[in-house]
Image (spheres, rainbow, N blue to C red):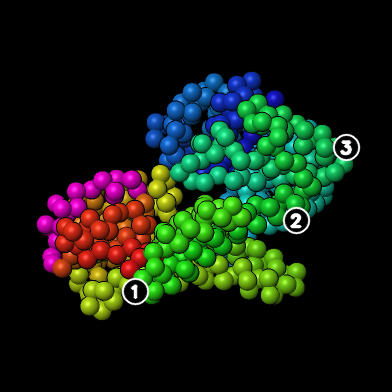
Amino acid sequence: MKICCIGAGYVGGPTMAMIALKAPDIRVTVVDLNERRIAAWNSDVLPVYEPGLDEIVREARGRNLFFSTDVRGAIAEADIVFVSVNTPTKTYGVGAGRAADLRYIESVARTIAEVATTPKIIVEKSTIPVRTATTIQEILAAHPGAPKCQVLSNPEFLAEGTAVADLQKPDRVLIGGERTPEGEQAIETLVSVYARWVPRERIITTNLWSSELSKLVANAFLAQRISSINAISALCEATEADVDEVANAIGKDSRIGPKFLKASVGFGGSCFQKDVLNLVYLCEHFGLPEVAAYWEQVVKMNDWQKRRFASKIVKTLYNTVADKRIAVLGFAFKKDTNDTRESAAINVCRDLLAEHANVVVYDPKVPADEIMSDVCGKGSANPRLGVAKTAYEACAGAHAIAIVTEWDEFKALDYEKIYAGMPKPAFLFDGRNITDLAKLKAIGFRACGIGKA
């Protein structure tokens, strides 16, 4: 069997590396038109940072795992073609700000139709709106001479930072296809790939549309929980309750559970906001405005939480941060990843810069040029924005520290040393609730967290 994956990003690269590791008899080729990205996958410095990924790639690469820019050649040889290209939110036209931009999905479908000479199993791995498979099917059917292909939905449920563990021991693998003899056969072929290491009872098979919709709904429910606890964090601050104690109390209820009840400065990443907005657009499209408004509030609450964090810094620092040095610790949207898409740090930095603060950012995995580009725009800069090489450098002389990403190293910093080098009073705002506020206050910091008095 030969597998081709179109798209060498955060999903395609790690997923194919795991398949290659667990199924050494399958030849897996990951293709992308981005030459720099493919070169990075073939180097010692991978374009994606995930704990444990380097070891997996090194073991399988060159044996049965290959990275290439020969998209058409890989498609022609493959039995199974995974489609793992970007599906960003549209920024123009009908559905701007909500609908998914499917231009790359359509482009891939047309390329497959042009290249394929034998039947393929085409697997949707990208996060896409429900009924997208119809678009792929129609493009293939309309192309003269294109072979009969089966389209399956196999959404990813990876959490960045734990992607390798999620791939090794997934909660479930979801595969959706048409309920026809050919569709069922295609489903079983893909099931046989994952069954090399995933228990069969954890591989769920559904119809095509249920699988496509399940990914959007799963992310919407997770985002909803985060926005819910963040809404309560504001109430906790107003009433002198402790949001962690509230979350622990309600999380003990088996009907609710403890996961995704961690208050913070807000969620980020490539999926949550994009998928919730996509769900909002679908609801509007199908004439369900009340349902659309319900889910849209999840995103509005998240945006408000980011603004509230920055506003609290300004208010606490005597209603002005103009010309004051603010150290922002963390820029990735979560720890153990170098992904900055929709990171709360971007909004926090922009809001502080708008108040004429001097912002100095430190993140252990995000390059300085990416930080500059995300905050200021590609090719632009702001003289008030700097990037430090260490947390200590960022905090030196800072009037306030804002912890925006929960990197473990921020828990182990020598805060007495940091405090000594800051103007007084020295402030610390923990946007992830990872520090011991009582100890920080004992040192002398005016420290506060999310949802804590």
Using a 10 Å C-alpha cutoff, classify the residue at mark 1 as few (fewer than 14 neighbours), some (14 to 19) or many (20 or more): some
Dot 1: element: helix
Q: Residue at x 52, y 46 (%)?
A: 159
Which of discs 1 and 3 lies nearer the camera? The answer is 1
- Percent across and percent down for residue 427 are 22, 65
Q: Which mark is residue 53?
A: none
Q: Residue at x 62, y 28 (%)?
A: 197
Q: Which residue is mark 3?
A: 181
Q: Which mark is residue 311?
A: 1
- Quarter of the image with the C terminus is bottom left
Q: Nearer the viewer, residue 187 or 116?
A: 187
Relative to residue 244, is residue 232 depicted above or below? below
Amino acid under disc 3? Pro
Relative to residue 9, is residue 342 depicted above or below? below
Amino acid under disc 1? Ser
Q: CA distance from mark 2 to mark 3?
A: 20 Å
Q: Residue at x 34, y 53 (%)?
A: 434
Range covered by the magenta-colored residues? 407-424
Question: Is residue 384 rendered magenta in the image?
Answer: no
Which of the two labelled residues, at mark 2 and mark 1, occupies the earlier sequence position?
2
Q: Which residue is mark 2?
A: 131
Which of the two labelled residues, at mark 1 and mark 3, occupies the earlier sequence position?
3
Q: CA distance from mark 2 to mark 1?
A: 41 Å
